Amino acid sequence: MPQLSRRQILQAGAVPALQRGRKFNLLFLMSDQHQRAASGCYGHGTVKTPNIDGLARRAVRFTSSYCTSPVCVPSRGSMITGQYAHKHGAHILQDPLPNDVPTIAHFYRERGYVTGAIGKMHFVDESRKHGFDHRLNEESFQRTLSATDRQKLRGDAGGIEGEGLDLPARFFEDNWFADRAVEFLHANKAKPFCLWASFVQPHTPFKPMKRFFDLYDQATLELPGRPEHDLEDGFEGNLIRAKERGWYRQSDEGARRSLAGYYGNVSQMDENAGTVYNALRELGLEKNTVVVYTSDHGEMAGAHRMWTKHNMFEESVAVPLLIAIPDGAQGVRTQIIEHIDLFPTLTELCGLGTVPGLVGRSFADLMRGRRYTAREFAYSEYWFCRNVFTRDDRYVGKAPLRMVRTDRWKLNYLPWSRSELFDVVKDPGEFHNRIDDAALAGVIRELKAIVERQFIQ
């Protein structure tokens, strides 16, 4: 499909929206690194997420939603552009999203919406607002702290050591972002708005406020599957990274402390998301606002002796997704959804018509209980990031790791190294690589063809 210009994309759908006379607001609540399973509404028996669970009861909850890249910058770029990373151009953590790529914020702003992005958007080059007129970011928060304050918060952005910080709420950026998002809602309650309220947690470091860390008894936390010889039969880069980072031989005690920190981060993020959502309801805006909750990617949380993301295991690439529409459907949908589908879906749900030129496809009909042809697979790609994946950057510049995930099979394809095939029905933990199974040669061939086809879209 030829790529349309920004002007063509922005102008599309304006007439249908006016004819229908509908104009819903959009509140997009986004976290960073929230594993789909790590919330009550997705069945976790330990993690406390009362606000997300409350939204889930009023929303449609998707059980098979996937990010299109398991790392922040490209994933976020895909959400706001409806394009895969190889098309929008922000491949790795260090890549700014190009200025000329149309985004969902451009689309809403063109239709008279006030657009805001408050919190972590990870644009890399923050001088590029990408259609968001009202912008507050991590630097905005840092300016509220003194040099002495900042010393108290120093920590490794990738650190997994769990710790509860006995500091006032003003020291935590997500608390500040939540308050600023509430101010945005009050200031724009009489106007159509598109607000992205984007939190840093539960991303590392795993150092929430002490009261959230203390919610979790480390001695009773259940560890994920992490067999002794894990990762030895797949892509060697995952094993190298886990050993270089010190994760592979982490003790059970250390893993439980890390989990307490991660779960504490999740619970603190949940409270901040609730602050914003509850303000929307108190203002009476719920009746004309589409509300979304998702995360840019997941978190391994100790599974396979790994932490953070940068791989295609379910813990890393599967994401929570809740969408509530005014007087709309509730319940659970099991169909496969990709993050690039959000842009065209949300414009339809808000009454702004369809968006041409996107790879993402609308699932608005699925939300409304109408006839819908489901995706047969989810696709995701990971371009190896500098200074993050391995110490020597040995994979940087090579073809990306590409995933195709159907209802039964997952292929993690590398043309230059050992690929992986998992039967996710019989082996949901993804412990047994079937890539050498001659009986599955036809399955592998079919999934490889999908990989190549998706990569040229």
Image (tube, rainbow, N blue to C red):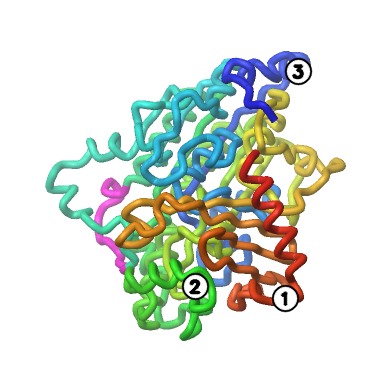
Measured Cα–Cα span from mark 2 to mark 1: 28 Å
Q: Circle 2: is it few (<14), some (14-19), or many (20+) Cα within 10 Å?
A: many
Q: Quadrant of the C terminus?
A: top right
The relative height of residue 275 versus residue 442 in the rendered view (above or below) is: above
Q: Is residue 165 magenta?
A: yes
Secondary structure beneath label 3? helix
Secondary structure beneath label 2? helix
Callout 2, which amino acid?
Ala
Pick the front one: 82 or 457: 457
Marks 1 and 3: which is nearer the front?
1
Q: Earlier in the sequence, mark 2 or mark 1?
A: 2
Measured Cα–Cα span from mark 1 to mark 3: 53 Å
Apparent side of residue 262 relative to residue 70 in the rendered image (left or right): left
- Mainly helix, strand or loop, the magenta region? loop
Measured Cα–Cα span from mark 2 to mark 3: 47 Å
Q: Can I make out residue 209 in this image?
A: no
Residue at 59 percent across and 54 percent down: it is 320
From the image, tell me which residue sits under label 1: 438
The relative height of residue 61 versus residue 6 in the rendered view (above or below) is: below
Q: Circle 1: is it few (<14), some (14-19), or many (20+) Cα within 10 Å?
A: few
Q: Quadrant of the N terminus?
A: top right
From the image, tell me which residue sits under label 2: 303
Q: Position of residue 119 (x, y in %)?
A: 40, 39
Query: Looking at this rendering, what residue extends furthest in the left direction?
Result: 148
From the image, tell me which residue sits under label 3: 16
Question: Which residues make up the magenta segment?
Answer: 161-172
Q: Earlier in the sequence, mark 1 or mark 3?
A: 3
Marks 2 and 1: which is nearer the front?
1
